[in-house]
Amino acid sequence: MTTSHTPLVTEGTHLIAGEWLSTSPGGSGTSENPARDGEPVGSFPLADGSVAADAVGAATDALENWRKTSFWQRAKVLETAAALIDQRVEELAVLLTLEEGKTIAEARGEVAITAETFRYQAGMAKVSTERIYPSGTPGETIRTVRAPLGVVGVITPWNFPILIPGWKIAPAIAAGNTVVWKPASNTPLIAVALAQVLTEAGLPDGVLNLVLGPGSMGNAIVNDERVHGVTFTGSVPVGFGIRDAVTARNGRVQLELGGHNPSIVFDDADLDLAAPMIVGAAFGSTGQKCTATRRIIAVGSVYDELVERLATGVQGLAVGDGLQDGVGIGPLVSPGARAESVDALATAVAEGAEVIATSDAPDGECFFAPTLLAGNDRLSITTEEVFGPISTVLRAADEDEAFAMANSTEFGLSASIYTNDMWRIDRAVHELEAGLVKINAATTGSEIHAPFGGEKQSSGHAPREQGDTAVDFFTRTRTAYIRPGTIR
Ligand code: NDP
């Protein structure tokens, strides 16, 4: 059975200064359903740099009033948005699956966590970020206050097209900033649906501006002097280009980039726990998670049994249209994404990787059978991020080799180990070079109230997203020295 699907939004529009606009100097684009060979989900106008500049202008104009708005009012908007998202979980999830391809269960989960993110950041808006310091001068108070960063550019990818924008937009507007948002071109309609939620929730005109268009249009936001900071999630080359442009004009930049996440499995691990968790972390969301398990490092004697169990898990994956009952893995997001996985698999095999297991996958221009490889750490696929459902099992002789292998990547987003040895667990927490270290848990998944981010090339140097640290990127700290105005 297939879940019924009437998309919530079929015609995308920009949102600038509270107006829904279809200005399309760059022509129009089509949002395509990857499960149905690109069947149109809807259309959207393509902005250019001048439309992006208008959006920045609207955000600039709205800043003064929004900055001065009471935190109660900002929190109220976020709480109302959370309630509206909760009411629309099903419609939003269907739209998400139609555009991105993930399963309806994954989409429902993503939408529900987005609502929680808005609710959590509404709560955080009411928590003081001020601090009082002792002063060496009698009668004086030293106090830090937070001012909003200003106009913030938000540039987001397609793989979590409602949640990642929520991670960024919710704390940005909670802290009194105004936003210009450029979503990914593969998932424009879910972006429009989220912008609709926020306007319905009472967000004043110009506080959130949405511009739809290609990456080149994003450059106009990045290079605009009126944009005080840019928060970006996406690929390393684009992220580093944005970093260079924004820091060159002394703007602030936050980057969440790729990953090449290892899971180490020791011979004392509970394989009933580890094997299904690793299969889920490697292949869930069709491997299109920045935190997906790309390398599985089997230490010593656990190798054979682990490989057997992983193979069984992979063979049992049901690939298909994410709206169909019983489907666990959807298509890749686009034909181009599929081509990358096809090429990467061919290269890996040519370099000596062995295919251990695959599952059945339907015909279709975006479907790709999840594939488990056995290999070594000299294969390109064990160093370069391939954003698809391919994961490689590696063999390590002992703990030292396993930790060295885990860290032998330019990325540092997430890493996990499976063991019951407390010494190893302690070592993992301190020595695995990753922003997220998971013990007996999947490399994927995080909680919205805890800081999220990576090390090495997986992130920039800005404060962490999510949790109580999210506000740090979106505010400037001012230190006030306050003395009585008379001499006593
Ligand atoms: P891209 O870097 O290609 O695109 C991300 C966003 O940047 C899109 O909105 C894109 O627009 C836009 N963009 C592209 N070029 C420019 C430019 N020159 N200036 C401004 N904006 C631009 O990444 P993908 O969409 O391929 O996303 C997948 C990547 O994201 C993976 O590497 C993955 O690991 C990473 N990721 C990291 C996460 C993390 O938290 N660390 C989480 C999720 C994903 P358009 O779509 O129009 O091209």
Image (cartoon, rainbow, N blue to C red):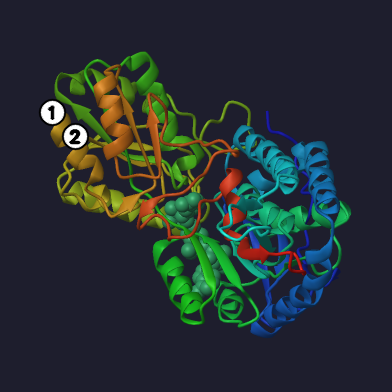
Q: Residue furthest front?
A: 488
Instruction: Look at mark 1 in the image and give the residue it sits on.
Output: 398
Q: Position of residue 345 (x, y in %)?
A: 29, 48
Foreground residue among 414 and 476: 476
Q: Can residue 180 be seen in the rendering of this structure?
A: yes
Q: Mark 2, residues whose alpha carbon is within 10 Å: few (<14), some, or many (≥20)?
A: many
**Mark number displayed over residue 298:** none
Asked if residue 123 lies left or right of residue 219, the reply is: right
Report the quarter where the C terminus lies.
bottom right
Q: Position of residue 370 (x, y in %)?
A: 39, 38
Q: Can residue 356 be seen in the rendering of this structure?
A: no
Q: Residue at x 11, y 29 (%)?
A: 397
Instruction: Look at mark 2 in the image and give the residue it sits on.
Output: 402
Q: Residue at x 63, y 47 (%)?
A: 163
Report the quarter where the N terminus lies.
top right
Q: Position of residue 291 (x, y in %)?
A: 43, 43
Q: Position of residue 280 (x, y in %)?
A: 44, 30
Where disc 2 sits, the SS reads helix
- 174 over 251 or under it: above or below: above
Q: Are marks 1 and 2 in contact (CB under 8 Å)?
A: yes
| Cα–Cα span, label 1 and label 2 | 6 Å
- 138 over 313 or under it: above or below: below
Where disc 1 sits, the SS reads loop
Which corner quadrant of the image does residue 203 belong to?
A: bottom right
Foreground residue among 263 and 486: 486
- 269 over 34 or under it: above or below: above
* Mark 1: amino acid: Asp
Q: Mark 1, residues whose alpha carbon is within 10 Å: few (<14), some, or many (≥20)?
A: few
Which corner quadrant of the image does residue 410 belong to?
A: bottom left
Foreground residue among 135 and 109: 135
Q: Residue at x 37, y 52 (%)?
A: 455
* Mark 2: amino acid: Ala
